[in-house]
Amino acid sequence: MSLLSQKHLLGIEFITEEDINLIFETATQFKEVLQRKIKKVPSLRDITIANLFFENSTRTRTSFELAEKRLSADIINFSASASSTKKGETLIDTVNNILAMKVDIIVMRHPNPGAHILLSKHIDAQIINAGDGTHEHPTQALLDAFSMREKIGDLRGKNIAIFGDIKHSRVAISNIYCLQKLGANVRVCGPPTLIPKYMPSLGVEVSYDIEDTLKWCDVANVLRIQLERQDIKYIPSLREYNIAFGIKKEMLDKLNKKIVIMHPGPMNRGVEIDSDVADSDHSIILQQVENGVAIRMAVLYLLAGKGTL
Ligand code: CP
């Protein structure tokens, strides 16, 4: 039975501040486990997990798989490109066939927003959303907020800016819900064509001024231009996007303070972020990836309803 307020992790929208803090406390303990010579605990040795990826992934997929192995779970990996979904099978039939093999937890990435919510109404297994279209990417938001907290402490009252393609970003939406639940002030910044009109209704500030937003923020979370989701041209060219909205070292050098630079990946170097920013000592991009394993261990452990570590 889940130790979080929800049976599933479908989105940050559905969990509480207490859930987020419990995930962070548990992840802190798992980070300590990951520093040990033997980086493995037997906590989920009675649990079987299926990783269902209907969309490409490097970080999320490997991070979940490693988290599951560190917790001693049995795992099966499913890739849509090599499956019978190509022969016309529905999502619910595919998942029910996998569940017939006695799977306890489904970790799923799917291109359709809300696919996990639909699935949760049809199956008994617990579901973790590893990204659903442009809707949510909850474990990314958790690892982002956890990494920010490690760097700048309690996020209450802190100014966090999210730069780039907000329109197509599930990371932006999950970050907004997560950061607001933790008491941070959130601003989005990018070209007007890539910022949805409903942003202010989420209690988020909107700015089209990159230099002013860099001055305002304690943390800049930079998102990529999602070329694969641009059905029409929202920007004239990648080169012009870089000139107008790319984060450049000169901009950071001009600030009278040190800000934290983050990026969930995959990065388009030279488009939304220049290499000398991504690789600078402002950047915690690889710490985000490292923290992802501990955060995903914590989510799996808590959803599986395990007691003290
Ligand atoms: N951040 C993220 O979701 O990366 P992947 O698409 O590589 O999983």
Image (cartoon, grey):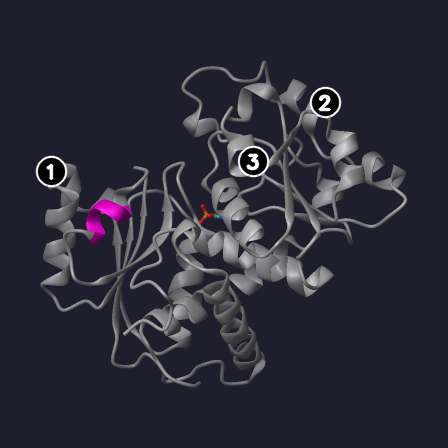
The amino acid pointed to by label 3 is Arg
Residue 75 location in percent, x, y?
27, 68
Residue bearing the label numbered 2: 243
The amino acid pointed to by label 2 is Ile
Q: For the point 51% across and 26% down, which residue is it?
A: 196
| First along the sequence among labels 2 and 3 | 3
Indicate whether residue 117 is drawn in magenta.
yes
Q: Which mark is residue 113?
A: none
| First along the sequence among labels 2 and 1 | 1
Q: Quadrant of the N terminus?
A: bottom left
Residue bearing the label numbered 1: 87
Q: For the point 45% across and 60% down, which residue is it?
A: 16
Indicate whether residue 263 is drawn in magenta.
no
The amino acid pointed to by label 1 is Lys
Quarter of the rendering containing residue 63: bottom left
Q: Main secondary structure of the magenta part?
A: helix
Which type of secondary structure does the marked residue at label 3 adopt? loop
